[in-house]
Image: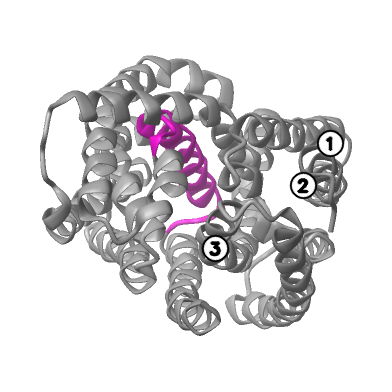
Amino acid sequence: MITKFKNDLFWNAISFGGIVVLGVLLNILILTFYDESALGVFNQVYAIFILLSQLAVGGVHLSIQYYVPSSSNSKEHISQYLTTALVSSLATGIVAIGVGYLLIPLIGKMLNSPEVTLGLYYSLWGLFFFSFNKIILSVFNGMREMKKFALFQFLRFSFMTIFLIILLFNNAPVYLLASILAFSELLLFLILIFSISPFLIWKFNKRFKKIFMIQNKFGITALFGNFLLDVNTKIDIFTLGIFLEDKWVGIYSFAATIAEGYMQFAVLLRNNINPIITKLIRKKNPSLIVKVLRENKIKFYKVLGLLGILSIAGFLVLIFILDRDYKLMSILLYAILITGFILSGGYQPFLMFFNQIGKPKIQTIYISFVCFSNIIFNFLLVPLIGVYGAAVGTALSFIFQVFLFRWLMKRSLNYTI
């Protein structure tokens, strides 16, 4: 298990490293060909796209991540959970897209940005394919096919970069840049559906109906918490969009997006530890889980701490190479965000812990309180100190997350780490 974990971690590290580079490149390209306001528009549309994507998939991907690892060698087992999830997301995807398009005028008015409004019209149709992609990727994750999982995650950002370059060299208007979100999901879907085709065995029988009900019950229970999980990563962007102009959102989002690239290393660790946690919980030995979590917590603190310090140094170099305005502001914003994350780094890979041990209700409570703390911090601080308020508020929510996790773990397993 240890050898495979290290091997999976290696391949995902390569993938996530590439994703971080491409994420930075996307931001630099938009800043170079346009300006901070354009970047603010793109990142606001991206944030809304990610949030609506959770409604589109309907939470069934979380069910897959819990049930597929229990029998990853059974083709029939995997096929049943995959096909029922795809049918479910077909309905939820259509609903999410419909709701999204109905809400566009309201969102545009709330953010006071016509460009964001148009960008949403050109991108939200991609939610249909995003939901399918999320499910298929969850199957590969549950099967611990991490090489494929890593490759496909990297391809998503590769396609986004390629489509962006095409638009940039054709002098596309700012709002059209958001369309890369939809086209990249469409192209990724065509590749994923081919890759997963051996497991697409359609049997509409009583077993199909039973699993369909099980998955949707689990998904609905976990959906709100998972939706808030994505909301939590975008609260700073939304808050700034409400209180400040697109220009300031762009300045902040440049630092925040690169910081999020660093934070993806916690996601990398999480994707690899999640199926292991699920297998351990089935042994009904809580003390063993606690031992594994404690050992990995220390390792995660060391790894994410070192990477965080290196990322701050790297950001300093990058910001002076770009030689744009607001250098000092960008550096301070980045340092605040990274410091908050480093202080909570050992616990960040366990963000989906309660879902992985089959307690989606506690997972929802956990994420809800983390999200609400972030909202409170941001709405209190942004009106007072502007973009710095978003960074400080987000950093404080990271730290709060540690204390909340320990408390909930004590209540659910009578252990803590």
The percent coordinates of residue 126 (x first, y second) are: 27, 39
Question: In the figure, 166 relative to 117: above or below?
Answer: below
Residue at image location 31% in from the left, 36% down from the top: 127
Q: CA distance from mark 3 to mark 2?
A: 29 Å
SS assignment at label 1? helix
Q: Is residue 40 magenta?
A: yes
Q: Nearer the viewer, residue 31 or 233?
A: 233
Tell me which amino acid carries mark 3. Answer: Ile
Q: Nearer the viewer, residue 124 or 213?
A: 213
Which of marks 2 and 1 precedes in the sequence? Answer: 1
Q: CA distance from mark 3 to mark 1?
A: 34 Å
- Contact check, label 1 and label 2, Cβ < 8 Å: yes
* 3 or 1: mark nearer the eye: 3
Residue 148: image quadrant is: bottom left
Q: Which residue is mark 2?
A: 394
- Region of the chain picked out in magenta, as a range: 34-60
Q: Which residue is mark 1?
A: 377
Q: CA distance from mark 1 to mark 2?
A: 7 Å
Residue 268: image quadrant is: bottom right
Q: Quadrant of the C terminus?
A: bottom right
